Amino acid sequence: MTGYGVGKIKRRDQECLVEIKTLNNKYCDIMIKNSMQSLEIEQKIEKLIKEKIFRGKVNILIKVESYASEKEKVILNENLFNSYCEALKILKEKYKFKDEINIDSIIKFKDIFQVVKKEEETGKMWPLIEEAVNKALDSLLEMREREGKILINDIKKRIKKITKLMDKIEKYSKLSLLEYKGNFLNKLKELTNGLNVDEGRIELEAAIFAGKSDITEEIIRTKSHLIQFNDLLNSMESAGRKMDFLIQEINREINTIGSKNNNLKITSLVILVKSELEKIREQARNIE
């Protein structure tokens, strides 16, 4: 589910800004940009996020400013430094540059240096960061909750529509056997030119047709899944993945109904059900 939240906490000599953005995703995928370059801080932030967000692509930006004197160190990325040197040598030889490769040539590549605050300093800042993250999370969840209510209302309307369509399918399925028997008898009369026909054989043919085209079980299971779907929509638990499962099951039953029945009215109703189901599938991807 999409959403955005921001949290900003300021103290005497420190300030922390946290921005959290979420996009639709089947799983919980967290990406953290942390200005402090601390793995310990990132692990703590990830734990806070996973306690409240279960689905979605989560992008988090952490900016920490400290106005007090800080202990910092500069780290040289030697592998990257060596790569730049080799690349410059190749360029010099290939294009016959006269200028020498020196420190002035390399210092322009600022990404070979990294300024990192010492771990004891980052540890002291965690309470400030934690408060800002929680504030951003509260803002994000409030926005996602508003969007979620709109999505749930839309899905409820579509579930209600599918339920009505299933009632019509059930009604027409009961008429199919009678129609088949009547059509079969009329065809026989045409072919036999009014001769007497074994009624028992007609009944047998009708029974065989009924066995092959009976969709009672599929209708019952579909209606059961729809009831479970409504229960999920009315519950307070995380329901996104359960909805995915129920949508798959309903779709399976609808496909079976479509393949077992040759009634044109039922076929048209099946198409309408699948259309509504696909719209629900798209919306359910946004549900936590």
Image: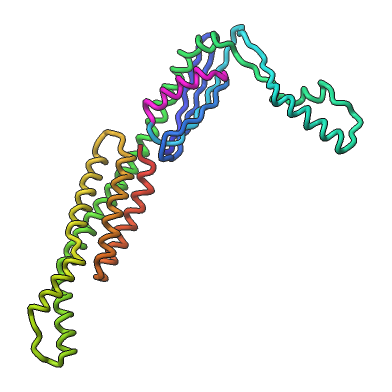
Q: Which residues are magenta?
A: 36-53
Using the rendered image of the protein, determine whether residue 161 is visible from the camera's viewpoint. yes
The image shows residue 85 at horizontal and vertical percentages of 78, 27
Q: Is residue 230 magenta?
A: no
Q: Quadrant location of the C terminus? A: top left
User: Left or right of 15: which side holds 182?
Assistant: left
| Residue at screen point 17% across, 80% down | 184
Q: Residue furthest right?
A: 98
Q: Residue at x 58, y 11 (%)?
A: 118
**Res 37 quadrant in image:** top right
Q: What colouring does the structure picture have?
A: rainbow
Along the line of sight, the residue nearer the viewer: 26 or 137: 26
State the image coordinates of residue 284 (x, y, percent, origin top left).
Answer: 35, 44
Visible in this render: residue 176? no
* Residue found 44% across the figure and 17% down from its top: 131
Residue drawn at 16 percent across, 84 percent down: 186
The quadrant holding residue 38 is top right
| The N terminus sits in image quarter | top left
Main SS type for the magenta part? helix
The answer to whether 169 is drawn above or below residue 195 in the figure is above
Left or right: residue 205 compared with residue 19: left
Q: Is 38 covered by the magenta stretch?
A: yes
Q: Position of residue 275 (x, y in %)?
A: 34, 58
Q: Is residue 124 above or below residue 77?
A: above
Name above or below for residue 95 compared with residue 120.
below
Given residues 137 and 253, the one toward you in this image is: 253
